[in-house]
Image: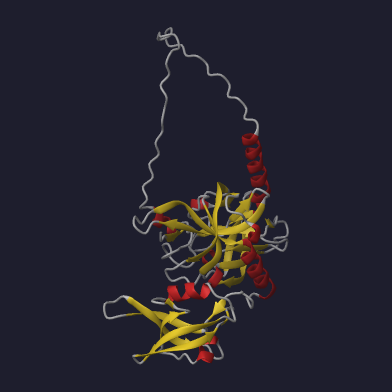
Amino acid sequence: MRINVIGSHMSGERNGGRASHARPRSSAASRCLAGAGITLVVLTAAACSSAGGSGTGGATASPSPAAVPSGPASSLEQQYEQVVARVLPSVVQISTSSGSGSGVVYDTKGDIVTNAHVVGTATTLQVDLASGGKALAANVVGVFAPDDLAVIRVRNGGSLRPASFGRSAEVRVGEVVLAMGNPLGLTGTVTDGIVSATGRTVSEGQGSSAVLTSAIQTSAAINPGNSGGALVNLAGQVIGIPTLAATSPQLGTAAAGIGFAIPSDTVASIAGQLIATGKVSNSGRASLGIAAQTVADASGQPAGVGVASVTPGGAAARAGIQPGDIILDLAGQPTASVAALQSVLAAHKPGDRIPARLSRNGAESTVQVTLGSLTS
């Protein structure tokens, strides 16, 4: 089953959700959820007497005190409480002139990791702590749009409490997880679910260059404003950064229980490089080395990827691909659009040698391309 994904973050760069897979938005993207009518049904139970009568007058019996849970359920509840108390102080709200989202304190220097689409084009941001108090000013350290990640730094942020990041490579399907963030502006909100799947490849679409690889799928509710927050296991470790919430392509409404998070191993690698140099030189992701746009056929349908320019010395240039060429398929996979080409590249690594079928001035040919490394 194919799904589309809407954004549930804030807004930093674009309005609305993302195409085939999109990000969480708060203010602007909450419009994406407006079409999904939500009905709350409250059921009340009528009281009845135990002896076949109606009782005396208007008197009612006092209910017995509720029993205090014990055993496994109580133990799980205590785990939830402990994890929330441990991690929530490390989850912040990030605001720009375009909207708001979430972030996770990364280190003792005041660095906070979030989504690139939360930061958008902002150069200065405002950070609000879960504990309240005066908002803190922050600057952008670096952004890596292909993985939808960014790092910002709070001035004089030494008092912030860093979260503990776990190894997403060790995440198991079925693990109980909590999503922490600021959905719909409700600061310090926690939802729960399980890890539904791992290793998903998700294209964010609608103008975004991000194609998430090895994404964690979760049933924990991901809503507008959760973007950039924390997906946490019961050991109190951040194993992912919630980024996407799904929507049904048939109904155009939110698909409950299908959300995606950037794995913590990716977060650690990219955030570490951004903090060190402000750039990413080793993303582990493949690059073709072109600027491109989707081209349409006579009926207006996407028909390929038009090469607008070629990076000198890049993979495409070495393979003989030229501006004006149209890439019809890559590694045997049709590339009717830029999003389709990005998804194919996301499944490969730098150094992979793959065929590219081209159309040049109406004549088709196939060249072999040795993929380069995607950098910022």
Is residue 28 something that shows in the picture? no
Give 255 or 206, whichever is nearer the viewer.
Answer: 255
Give 106 or 255, whichever is nearer the viewer.
Answer: 255
- In the depicted structure, whether residue 286 falls above or below residue 32: below
Can you tell which quarter of the image residue 376 is in? bottom right
- In the depicted structure, whether residue 60 falls above or below residue 306: above
Q: How many numbered discs sit on the rendered protein? A: 0
Which residue does the image show at 63% across and 43% down from the upper left? Answer: 80
On the image, the x and y values in percent for residue 136 come to: 63, 59
Of the 4 image quadrants, the one containing the N terminus is bottom left
Give 214 or 266, whichever is nearer the viewer.
Answer: 214
Is residue 374 something that shows in the picture? yes
Which residue does the image show at 36% across and 57% down from the upper left? Answer: 252
On the image, the x and y values in percent for residue 158 come to: 73, 60
- In the depicted structure, whether residue 119 falls above or below residue 178: below
Q: Residue furthest front?
A: 332
Can you tell which quarter of the image residue 69 is in? top right
Q: Is residue 266 left or right of residue 259?
A: right
On the image, the x and y values in percent for residue 36 come to: 37, 50
Which residue does the image show at 36% across and 47% down from the upper left? Answer: 37
Q: Is residue 335 left or right of residue 95?
A: left
On the image, the x and y values in percent for residue 16 come to: 41, 62
- In the depicted structure, whether residue 75 falls above or below residue 319: above
